[in-house]
Image (cartoon, helix red, strand yellow):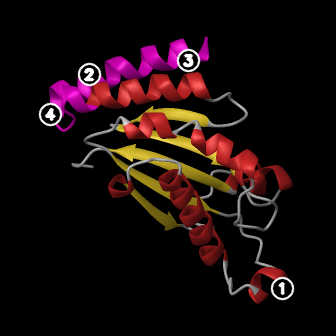
Amino acid sequence: MRRTFLKLAVAPAALGLLGLTGCVSMERYEELERAYQQLQGRYTADEAEIRMLQGRLRVTMTDRILFPSGGYRIEEAARQQLRKMVPTLQGLVQTRVIVEGYTDNTPVGPELRRMGISSNLDLSSRRADTVADTLIREGAPRNLISADGRGESNPIASNDTPQGRAQNRRIEITLVGPGN
């Protein structure tokens, strides 16, 4: 039900933007719409949140799906989650894929510091790089993918509660067109 509502809400808005601004071509919109449909079919709501916003498709995955607590290396289960995305990424032509890592505001601990990670920005960068490298190794086009760590910037919830901090620890994989 939510998928249908979201699709009905997004499609007219995107088409309206096409007519008003001309920024997003019909081909570009159709490519994102196909990717959206494919990814919706591959992930459950507790694995990833998939949203289409202003000519961009964003897949948000929590750190618990991908990384052990306080770490940046992924296990086979996380590779399987990322592998679900690769067939969609392989079909893209006019789209860039930006992998962004985020953390909560809890300072990194001594174990991470011993590994050369001195800040949340370092940790988020390593996580984003790990996800991008995994997608590429699994077959996603190397020339489309970039990675960036954002640290504790742009929280989506309060860092005052364990639940809020958990929401802020995430990976966002955004599909954007060449003009965005």
Q: Where is residue 166 drawn, in percent x and y?
A: 77, 53
Disc 3 to disc 4, C-alpha distance: 26 Å
- For the residue marked with disc 2, what is the amino acid? Leu
Q: Give the extent of the magenta segment.
A: 1-28
Disc 4 to disc 1, C-alpha distance: 51 Å
Q: Which of marks 3 and 4 is nearer the N terminus?
A: 3
Decide whether the magenta segment is chiefly helix, strand or loop: helix
Q: Which of marks 4 and 1 is nearer the N terminus?
A: 4
Q: Mark 3 points at which residue?
A: 3
In this view, 15 is above or below 106: above
- For the residue marked with disc 1, what is the amino acid? Pro
Q: Where is residue 83 drawn, in percent x and y?
A: 58, 41
Left or right: residue 162 versus residue 34 is right
Q: Which of marks 2 and 3 is nearer the N terminus?
A: 3
Q: Which of marks 2 and 1 is nearer the N terminus?
A: 2
Q: Where is residue 7 drawn, in percent x and y?
A: 46, 18
What secondary structure is marked by label 1?
Answer: helix
Pointer 2: residues within 10 angstroms few (<14), some, or many (20+)?
some
Residue at figure coordinates x 61%, y 77% from the top left = 122
- Mark 3 against mark 4, which lies toward the viewer? 3
What secondary structure is marked by label 2?
Answer: helix
Disc 1 to disc 3, C-alpha distance: 43 Å
In this view, 121 is above or below 11: below
Q: Mark 1 points at which residue?
A: 110
Q: Name the residue under label 2.
A: 15
Residue placed most toward the observer, 132 or 17: 132
Residue at figure coordinates x 73%, y 50% from the top left = 76
- For the residue marked with disc 3, what is the amino acid? Arg
